[in-house]
Amino acid sequence: MRWLSAAKQEWLRLLTHGLVLPPLPAEPDRGACPQCSGPMVVQKSTPRQGRTLEHGRFDARETVLVCAARCRTPSGSLVTRRAACLSERLLPRSAVGYDVLVFVGMQRFAEHRQREEIKSALWNRFGLDLSTGEVSRLAVIFTEYLRRLHEAHGPALRAALERDGGWPMHIDATGEDGRGTLLVVMAGWRHWVLGAWRIPTERADAILPHLRDTVLRFGPPCAVMRDLGRAMRTAAQPAGRPQVIRTLDRLCAILEPVAREKAFADLDRLLTYRVALFEELRTALRLVPKPAGRRDTPVGGSGGTTPAEMEGIKSAVDRLALSLHKRRPRRGPAQDARQAIDLVLRHLEDHGAYLWDRAVQLPQKAGGGLRLVDRTNNLPEAFFHGIKHGERRRSGRKGLAADFESRPASAALVPNLKRPDYVAIVCGTLDNLPQAFAKLYAGERGRLPAPADRHRGTATIRASASKPREDRMLVRSDAMSRAIMSAARSRAPRTTPRHRHPSVAAFCQA
């Protein structure tokens, strides 16, 4: 865009001398009509403003060409041609550039910045003044563009997953106080978010359609990891925390007289036995806390567990089950120990088969060999934890019910932009993301409306187990209150049944 760079220098020179800045010319290439190969004539010249990170704020006069033969597109509109220097940098029917859109979206959903912080950054770093309402609007449009870009590169993403030999599907959902429930499907080995949807509640009829859509787009998964209903909690180790150790010592000193009581002593003995039994199971499964320095799992891995180690874990669990069968009291007063052992054995019997079939045989085109699938659903759990942590940082609120309702579901795709392998497929580098958005809309021009016109209807679809926000606003409106009170105070309408029993008819006549 050399003409604009030179014009900006001229603008600075004229501004220095106190002269009036003329609008920058923006003329399209005068080529032939793509349909009839006829000439293109000038339809109009219109002023247009622009605000981009690259060039700041500028004024331009855009020339729009139209086919002289009045050819029309399949949608019925005239075949026109606009200046590429503007259409490739500014959003449709907007003065904001694609680079500003990407900056606002990344600051909002990747860095979890507040609107005032984003507004200040735009002004201090680029000299652009946007209102807080415009920042919110651009953030929602960014998620809609990212969703379209994700769907447009579905075949390329599917090919990458197939080169890995398949992909394990991780399914989980989260919400706040039964509102704003978000369903997410992730590819386990690549840590990609393949789809995110707002659902009313965690029910099969609400989840299955989205799972079928994901399978159609990215192929059938090689394994499925789903939540069994019991959230796994990571044990906190007090080692290395002197203040925690001192607090626990003080607590033990306070509770020591209570522990001498017989009732509490029996309870202490029961809990101690159950904790020891749980530690045995944890040791056999090797569910150790993740090291502090390890933040991620490499592509193709499964938490660092090899097939040989998995066989060792299986043998350890089998030995533990055999030992528990032998140690289980048959009769006598050891009812609590019997119940604890039965609980562990029942869980191993019900869910043990899901712990070992984690080795996936890769096809030869993917290099062959075995690849393991994670034994837990900690991947989406950590993903949701990051989202909620960022939203609490942004809003300063502990309860996120309202935030989750107003947050677009497609915002869950933003963390994919931190994955270099994903970015390389959809846009090459993050610096090319504005150009990818512009190219995406240029290919959809004439078939889809601009996101600025439709983001309020589709990008922020909200549903919850309670009333959605739109329903609450309707129910709490004054018009609804007046209608309810009017109906309550009015007399019930009289209705005459079509077929009346003879005795009832005689009674009514009397």
Image (cartoon, rainbow, N blue to C red):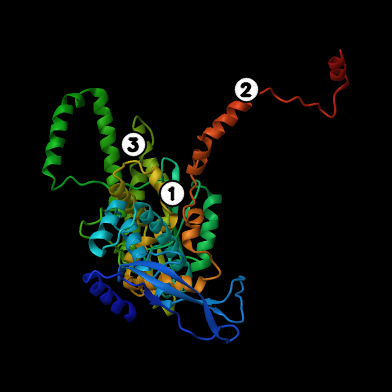
Does the residue at mark 1 contact the one at mark 3 (Cβ under 8 Å)? no
Q: Which tag, 2 or 1, sits closer to the chain's start?
A: 1
**Element type at mark 3:** helix
Closer-to-camera residue (381/200): 200
* Marks 3,2: beta carbons within 8 A: no
Say what secondary structure mark 2 lies in.
helix
Quarter of the image for the N terminus: give it.
bottom left
Q: Mark 3 points at which residue?
A: 337
Q: Which is closer to the viewer, label 3 or label 2?
A: 2
Quarter where residue 419 is shown: bottom left
Q: Is residue 120 visible?
A: yes
Q: Which amino acid does label 1 sit on?
A: Leu
Position of 475 relative to 447 (above/below) = above
Q: Where is residue 273 in the image (x, y as percent from the top left)?
A: 27, 38
Within-10-Å neighbours for mark 1: few <14, some 14–19, many 20+: few
For mark 1, give the secondary structure. loop
Q: How far apart are marks 2 and 1 (CA)?
A: 51 Å
Q: Which of 105 and 77 lies nearest the eye of the viewer?
A: 77
Placement of the C terminus among the 4 image quadrants:
top right
Mark 2 residue type? Arg
Nearer the observer: mark 1 or 3; the answer is: 1
Q: Please name the residue shown 46% across and 53% down the image.
A: 460
Q: Name the residue under label 1.
A: 228
The quarter of the displayed image where residue 84 is located:
bottom left
Q: Earlier in the sequence, mark 3 or mark 2?
A: 3
Amino acid type of disc 3?
Ala
Mark 1 or 3, nearer chain start? 1
Residue 240, image x and y in percent? Answer: 13, 48
